Image (tube, rainbow, N blue to C red):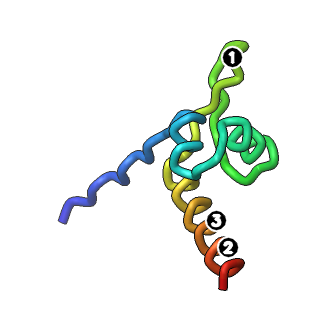
């Protein structure tokens, strides 16, 4: 049986990641700098990042769980 290649993970911009997480773009940039979100820095002086979609989803789930625990 032929094996299928792993699906490439989608990359999100800082703005897209911020919208998913419900935070500002500067917060996402801080998460990247602090190592909470792995990202690829784009070449040039813009400082733009491409962030792994799966990592954003994991962090979003962690944030939801922490928020739920705090409200309980």
Q: Nearer the viewer, residue 47 or 27?
A: 27
Quarter of the N terminus within the rendering: bottom left
Please indicate whether residue 5 sits to the left or right of residue 71 in the image: left
Residue under label 3, please give it: 63
| Alpha carbons under labels 2 and 1: distance apart | 33 Å
Quarter of the C terminus within the rendering: bottom right
Q: Give the foreground label among 2 and 1.
A: 2
| Alpha carbons under labels 3 and 1: distance apart | 28 Å
Q: Give the foreground label among 3 and 1.
A: 3
Residue 57 at what x, y percent from top left? 52, 58
Q: Quadrant of residue 27?
A: top right
- Measuring 81% from the left and 48% from the top, which residue is drawn there? 34
Looking at the image, tell me whether mark 3 or mark 1 is earlier in sequence order: 1
The local secondary structure at tag 1 comes to loop
- Measuring 50% from the left and 48% from the top, which residue is drawn there? 53
The local secondary structure at tag 2 comes to helix
Q: Are discs 2 and 3 less than 8 Å apart at CB? A: yes
| Alpha carbons under labels 2 and 3: distance apart | 5 Å
Residue under label 1, please give it: 46
Q: Nearer the viewer, residue 20 or 51?
A: 20
Q: Are discs 3 and 1 less than 8 Å apart at CB? A: no
Give the class, few, some or many, for how many residues have Cα within 10 Å of label 3's Cα (few <14, many ≥20). some
Residue under label 2, please give it: 66
Depicted 5 relative to depicted 70: above or below: above
The local secondary structure at tag 3 comes to helix
Q: Nearer the viewer, residue 15 or 11?
A: 15
Residue 67 at what x, y percent from top left? 65, 71
- Measuring 62% from the left and 68% from the top, which residue is drawn there? 62
């Amino acid at each position: 049986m032929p094996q299928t290649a792993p699906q490439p993970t989608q990359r999100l911009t800082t703005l897209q990641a911020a919208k998913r997480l419900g935070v500002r773009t500067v917060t996402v940039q801080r998460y990247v700098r602090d190592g909470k979100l792995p990202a690829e820095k784009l070449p040039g002086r813009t400082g733009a990042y491409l962030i792994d979609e799966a990592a954003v989803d994991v962090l979003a789930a962690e944030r939801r769980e922490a928020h739920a625990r705090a409200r309980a």
